[in-house]
Image: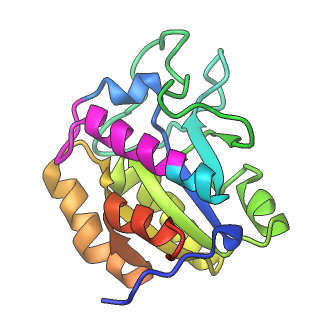
Amino acid sequence: MASLLLDPDRTALVVIDLQEGIIGMPTAPHPADEVVRKAAALADACRQAGVFVVLVHVDALLDGRDALRPETDAGSWAGGPRPATWARIVAELGPRSGDHVVTKHQWGAFYGTDLDLQLRRRGIDTILLTGISTNAGVESTARDAYERGYRQVFVVDAMAARSAEEHEHTVQRVFPRIGLVRTAEEVIGALAPAD
């Protein structure tokens, strides 16, 4: 396992979909409140270390016409009308002063957003990824980041999916091929200044 070295000036924390409408859904293997707690602790450590924090949430226009509607065997995930607070980022995460908020309209956080622009203009080449769902929003963002040449660290205990099987498949089969798989404690430790 490669040692984890992080340069705060070249690193960003990208938090995927920790918003009110998503954290209320069942998740595994970690409950959503645990994911939020670990992601919030990681975000605080990142801010303290000078790491750029990006909070990503998914939303659609009120008329819903910009929402994805592909024909799928699993059916639509969109459901009916959403409460007004559905896309609100959870209070534990912020946003805080200096954070950047990205609103996406599909699974991945790069397509149709300014995420790549914001990272590149800051000279960022490393992304720490957390959020819900491991195998949807996080994995889609990770695949796009890989194709753009970013170094990635997946904070696996600060993410979850709809089932443990979906989470574990991505963590064991996809993430090790495109980045480093670490815990929140390991990442926070790598951000701490050397004595």
How many numbered marks are there? Answer: 0
Main structural element of the magenta stretch: helix, strand or loop?
A: helix
Q: Residue 108: in sight, yes or no?
A: no
Q: Nearer the viewer, residue 81 or 42?
A: 42
Left or right of 80? Residue 65 is right
Q: Residue 51: in sight, yes or no?
A: yes
Residue located 66% across and 34% down the image: 96
Can you give x and y, in whole percent of width and height, for residue 148 in the image? 65, 76
Q: Which residues are magenta?
A: 26-44
Q: Is 41 within the magenta? A: yes
Q: Is residue 123 above or below residue 84?
A: below
Residue located 14% across and 56% down the image: 165
Can you give x and y, in whole percent of width and height, for residue 186 in the image? 35, 68
Can you give x and y, in whole percent of width and height, for residue 11 in the image? 63, 68
Q: Residue furthest bottom?
A: 2
Q: Is residue 49 above or below residue 88?
A: below
Q: Is 157 within the magenta? A: no
Residue located 24% across and 42% down the image: 162
In the figure, residue 138 lies in which quadrant? bottom left
Can you give x and y, in whole percent of width and height, for residue 67 in the image? 58, 32
Left or right of 172? Residue 184 is right
Q: Is residue 49 above or below residue 126?
A: above
